C-alpha cells in the first residue's frame, strides 16, 4: 500500500464540497454474455465527463469487455449477448436508431499494441477525416497538424510526414494512434492497456499526454498497472469476476477502499 500512496497527491481541498460533474455515460443494469458465459453482471455506473477514469482488476474480470461495450466494438464478437443500457447524450447506445459509425467516431479507441496503418504518417492521421468526407487539402493538413500537436508528436515528425509510420518507435507509434483517434474529433477516448507494450520512458510520455488531454476529452483507461491508475486517474473502478465491486475517487480507492476485495487486490494479495 505504501508504494501506491507515494504516487497519490494530497488534495489540499479535501474538506471542501466536491464539484458536481456532468456524466458522459450512465450505465444501467448492463449484462453481457459470451455464449453461455456471463462476463458482465448487472453493472450500474455513472462515468463523469472529462478527466480520467481507470478500470482495474485481475485478468478475465471483464475490464476490456466493459470498455469495448461503451462503443459497441464488443459486438464484433458474434456470440455476444447484451442486456441493460448505456446512456450517452440521453440515448441508449444499443437503440436500433444509433448510427455505429457516428458512435465510434465520437467514442474513439486506442488499443494495447500500437497499430499504425502501413501508410505515411500523414495518411495515418488523415485516414479518418477522409473517410468522413473531408477532401479540402488545406483543412486536412491543418487537422493533421492539430491532431499531432495534441498527441505531442508534431515536433518529432513534422519534417517526415511522408515517411512510413512503421518506421516510428513503439512509443511514437502509440502517440500516432492517439493522433489518428483525435483527428476524427471524438468526445471520449477509450484506452485498453495503452502502455503495456512500451518502455518506461514511452509510458511516461503517454501518461503525460493523457493528463494534458483530460480537460478536453473524457478518457477511460483499462490498466493492470496499479501505480499508473493511481498516478493518472481521477476515479477508479475495480472489477472482479464480471462484477463492479467498487467505484470511487482514485484517492479513496487506493487509500481507504470500502470493500475488502478491493484492498486485497491493490495491496497485491491476489491478481
Image: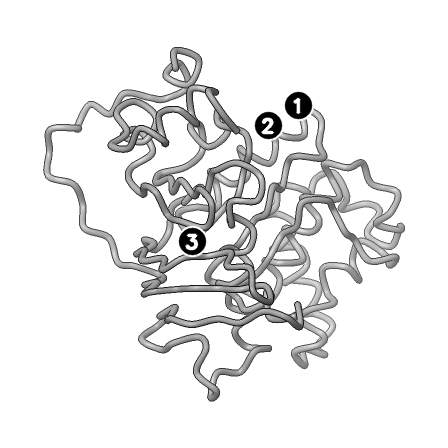
Above or below, comparing residue 137 to residue 45 in the picture: below
Q: Earlier in the sequence, mark 3 or mark 1?
A: 1
Tell me residue 239's x, y (percent). 43, 43
Crowding near pointer 1: few (<14 within 10 Å), some, many (20+)? few
Q: Say whether residue 186 is visible.
A: no
Tell me residue 270's x, y (percent). 49, 25
Q: Earlier in the sequence, mark 3 or mark 2?
A: 2
Q: Secondary structure at mark 1?
A: helix
- Report whether 137 appears left or right of 18: right
Q: Secondary structure at mark 2?
A: helix
Tell me residue 48's x, y (percent). 32, 53
Above or below, comparing residue 145 to residue 200 in the picture: below
Q: Which residue is mark 3?
A: 218
Q: Which mark is residue 204?
A: 2
Q: Which mark is residue 200?
A: 1
Tell me how far mark 1 sits from mark 2, CA to CA: 6 Å
Pointers 1 and 2 in contact (CB under 8 A)?
yes
Amino acid at each position: 500500500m505504501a508504494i501506491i500512496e507515494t504516487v497519490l497527491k494530497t488534495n489540499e481541498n479535501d474538506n471542501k464540497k466536491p464539484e458536481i460533474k456532468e456524466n458522459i455515460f450512465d450505465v444501467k443494469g448492463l449484462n453481457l454474455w459470451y455464449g453461455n458465459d456471463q462476463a458482465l453482471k448487472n453493472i450500474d455506473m455513472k462515468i463523469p465527463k472529462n478527466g480520467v477514469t481507470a478500470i482495474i482488476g485481475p485478468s478475465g474480470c471483464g475490464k476490456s469487455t466493459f470498455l469495448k461495450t461503451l462503443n459497441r466494438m464488443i459486438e464484433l464478437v458474434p456470440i455476444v449477448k447484451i442486456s441493460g443500457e448505456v446512456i450517452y447524450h440521453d440515448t441508449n447506445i444499443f437503440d436500433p436508431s444509433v448510427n455505429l459509425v457516428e458512435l465510434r467516431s465520437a467514442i474513439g479507441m486506442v488499443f494495447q499494441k500500437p497499430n499504425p496503418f502501413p501508410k505515411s504518417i500523414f495518411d495515418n492521421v488523415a485516414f479518418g477525416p477522409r473517410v468522413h468526407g473531408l477532401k479540402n487539402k488545406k483543412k486536412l493538413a491543418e487537422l493533421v497538424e492539430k491532431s499531432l500537436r495534441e498527441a505531442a508528436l508534431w515536433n518529432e515528425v513534422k519534417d517526415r510526414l511522408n515517411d512510413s509510420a512503421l518506421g516510428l518507435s513503439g512509443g511514437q507509434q502509440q502517440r500516432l494512434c492517439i493522433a489518428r483517434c483525435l483527428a476524427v474529433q471524438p468526445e471520449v477516448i477509450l484506452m485498453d492497456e495503452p502502455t503495456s507494450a512500451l518502455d518506461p520512458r514511452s509510458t511516461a510520455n503517454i501518461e503525460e499526454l493523457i493528463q494534458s488531454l483530460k480537460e478536453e476529452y473524457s478518457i477511460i483507461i483499462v490498466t493492470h498497472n496499479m501505480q499508473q491508475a493511481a498516478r493518472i486517474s481521477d476515479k477508479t473502478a475495480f472489477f472482479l469476476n464480471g462484477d463492479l465491486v467498487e467505484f470511487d475517487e482514485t484517492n479513496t480507492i487506493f487509500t481507504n477502499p470500502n470493500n475488502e476485495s478491493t484492498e486485497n487486490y491493490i495491496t497485491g494479495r491476489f491478481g
